[in-house]
Image: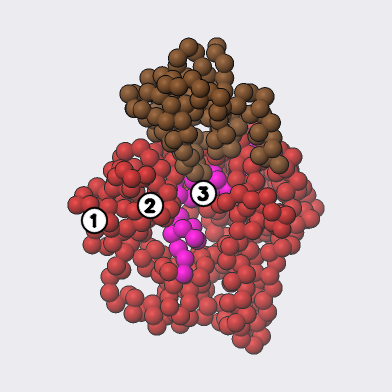
């Protein structure tokens, strides 16, 4: 298990060497409600930090998912196509969405650590 | 259904319960209502498979009585009130002079010259004003919305649960009602609902709502009864093919194109909007409300465009959802009458996804007809 980082748009990224595994946070899935459809990027896509690269649809609304880091999509979680509710059930583990081959490690400085993210969502909900 | 935390929102008498069990609350037509308790999909499935209890106290209840109440309500609505037996209810519409829909509602025949209109929360004030504006002598209008709670028990086990309250409940026929004592107070109980399942709607004064709610949940324990929110209610009504005001119908739609012509009795009565309605009926409707099933996965949402195979825009989506009971993405919308042909394509985030027009209802209707 590598270091986990968070975005202001409620994505997480777990860093293992030059690969970042990404998904949406528990807070995000809980706000969205039951997720019924996921649109993932394709392997090989180049993504940039904070740009839209996936969509999750819940029973209530469609939400954009932003890339926590720039790089090339290395792998996607195909399981989600037939079982999008994995994001609700296990947002940080089985509900991972895509892996990025990290292009620029300095971008990690733009992300929050777990304690800061917790504070961030506390503030946001008050 | 935008979420807000405004303090001015109205609350139903069951608000403390919703808060206690940490239901997700949203602003629905100015009411702070539970959209879900444990998840929309779970609640939707539980209603079809077992039973669900809904707090729909936001609905408007308007009582109309007086010597001319019958002729008054007959003139203001499209369905034939003469056909309404005592202690029964009918689906009905208020339309304007332009023959477009002001609201769809349930009309209860409480007694001779005595009616109850159960209207959409979003239209309640508009309808109260409309009634006053068209009021004749010897008609009394009373808005009881803020003092009346409405609980809806829906699903295959609804009858079994209600039987525990009173054995005579079983005798209530579909779209009929009785007054019955429950836990020491009087309730109006009708066999009706908005899910396509057998079920009951229970009206009581606000002060008794919590007792009734807790009692029903307790009696339903052995039948997997669970509370369900407005999210599940919306999926259930789409599965059943029922229109919702603000989606399929509004002041820009007429009953014919909305496939509600069956509730407009032009040959049987005179009513506001009849002249225009007769004109409308002379020509085939230019557009039609249809249901569709996505053949390629995606959630169609209100306002999305519908295309034909030649890339012509032929209509608009009015509602769409994922149906956990069918494991399909379904929806409704309006399509030009000349273009009702399969397949159709829904534009979702710039992509055209194939769908197939399908007949309503999407699920088997299980009401006790």
Q: Which residue is mark 2?
A: B304
Crowd class of label 1 (few under 14; some 14 to 19; many from 20; radius 10 Å): few
Crowd rating for badge 3 (residues with CA inside 10 Å; few <14, some 14–19, many 20+): many
Image location (x, y in percent) of residue B74: 53, 78
| Residue positioned 72% across, 48% down in the render | B15
Q: Quadrant of the N terminus of chain A?
A: top right
Labels 2 & 1 near each other (Cβ < 8 A):
no
Q: From the image, which quarter does the C terminus of chain A lie in?
A: top right
Residue pictured at 47% horizontal, 26% vertical? A69
Above or below, B324 relative to B254: above
Mark 3 vs 2, N-terminal side: 3
Give whichever of B177, B119 is nearer the camera: B119
Using the image as rendered, state which of residue A42 and residue B29 is in the foreground.
A42
Of the residues under marks 2 and 1, which one precedes in the sequence? Answer: 2
- Measured Cα–Cα span from mark 3 to mark 1: 30 Å
Q: Position of residue B131 (x, y in %)?
A: 60, 77
Q: Secondary structure at mark 2?
A: loop
Which of the pair A82/B269 is nearer the observer? Answer: A82
Q: Earlier in the sequence, mark 3 or mark 1?
A: 3
Q: Residue at x 62, y 70 (%)?
A: B125
Q: What is chain B's hue in the picture?
A: red
The magenta segment is: B225-251
**Residue B156 seen anywhere in this rendered image of the structure:** no
Q: Outermost residue toward the bottom?
A: B137
x and y percentages locating residue B119 in the rendered image: 58, 64
Instruction: Please name which of the two marks, 3 or 2, marks the residue nearer to the observer.
Output: 2
């Amino acid at each position: 298990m590598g270091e986990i980082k968070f975005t202001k748009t409620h994505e997480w990224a777990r860093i293992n060497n030059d690969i970042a595994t990404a998904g949406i946070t528990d807070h995000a899935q809980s706000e969205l409600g039951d997720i019924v459809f996921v649109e993932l990027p394709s392997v090989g896509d180049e993504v940039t930090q904070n740009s839209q690269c996936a969509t999750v649809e819940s029973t209530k609304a469609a939400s954009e998912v932003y890339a926590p880091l720039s790089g090339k999509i290395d792998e996607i979680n195909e399981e989600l196509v037939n079982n999008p509710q994995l994001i609700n059930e296990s947002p940080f583990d089985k509900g991972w969405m895509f892996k990025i081959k990290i292009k620029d490690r300095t971008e990690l400085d733009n992300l929050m650590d777990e304690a800061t993210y917790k504070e961030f969502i506390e503030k946001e909900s008050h | 259904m935008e979420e807000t935390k405004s303090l001015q929102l109205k609350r139903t008498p069951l608000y403390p319960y919703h808060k206690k069990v940490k239901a997700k609350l949203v602003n629905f037509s100015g009411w702070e209502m539970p959209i879900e308790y444990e998840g929309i999909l779970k609640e939707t499935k539980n209603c079809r498979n077992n039973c669900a209890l809904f707090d729909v106290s936001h609905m408007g209840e308007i009582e109309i009585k007086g010597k001319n109440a019958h002729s008054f309500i007959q003139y203001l609505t499209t369905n034939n009130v003469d056909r309404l037996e005592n202690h029964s209810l009918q689906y009905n519409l208020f339309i304007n002079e332009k023959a477009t829909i002001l609201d769809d509602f349930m009309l209860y025949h409480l007694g001779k010259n005595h009616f109850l209109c159960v209207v959409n929360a979003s239209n309640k004030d508009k309808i109260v004003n409309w009634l006053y504006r068209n009021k004749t002598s010897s008609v009394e209008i009373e808005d009881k919305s803020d003092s009346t709670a409405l609980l809806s028990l829906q699903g295959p086990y609804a009858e079994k649960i209600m039987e525990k309250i009173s054995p005579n409940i079983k005798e209530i026929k579909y779209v009929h009602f009785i007054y019955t004592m429950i836990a020491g107070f009087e309730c109006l109980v009708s066999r009706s609902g908005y899910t396509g399942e057998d079920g009951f709607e229970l009206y009581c004064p606000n002060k008794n709502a919590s007792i009734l709610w807790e009692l029903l949940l307790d009696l339903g324990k052995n039948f997997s009864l669970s509370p369900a929110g407005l999210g599940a209610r919306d999926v259930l009504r789409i599965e059943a093919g029922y229109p919702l005001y603000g989606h399929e119908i509004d002041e820009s739609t007429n009953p014919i194109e909305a496939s509600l012509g069956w509730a407009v009795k032009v040959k049987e009565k005179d009513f506001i909007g009849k002249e225009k309605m007769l004109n409308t009926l002379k020509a085939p409707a230019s557009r039609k409300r249809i249901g569709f099933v996505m053949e390629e996965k995606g959630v169609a949402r209100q306002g999305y465009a519908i295309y034909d195979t030649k890339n012509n825009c032929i209509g608009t989506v009015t509602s769409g959802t994922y149906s956990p009971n069918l494991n399909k993405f379904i929806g409704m919308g309006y399509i030009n009458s000349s273009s009702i042909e399969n397949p159709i394509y829904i534009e979702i985030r710039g992509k055209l996804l194939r769908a197939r027009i399908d007949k309503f209802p999407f699920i088997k209707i299980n009401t006790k007809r």
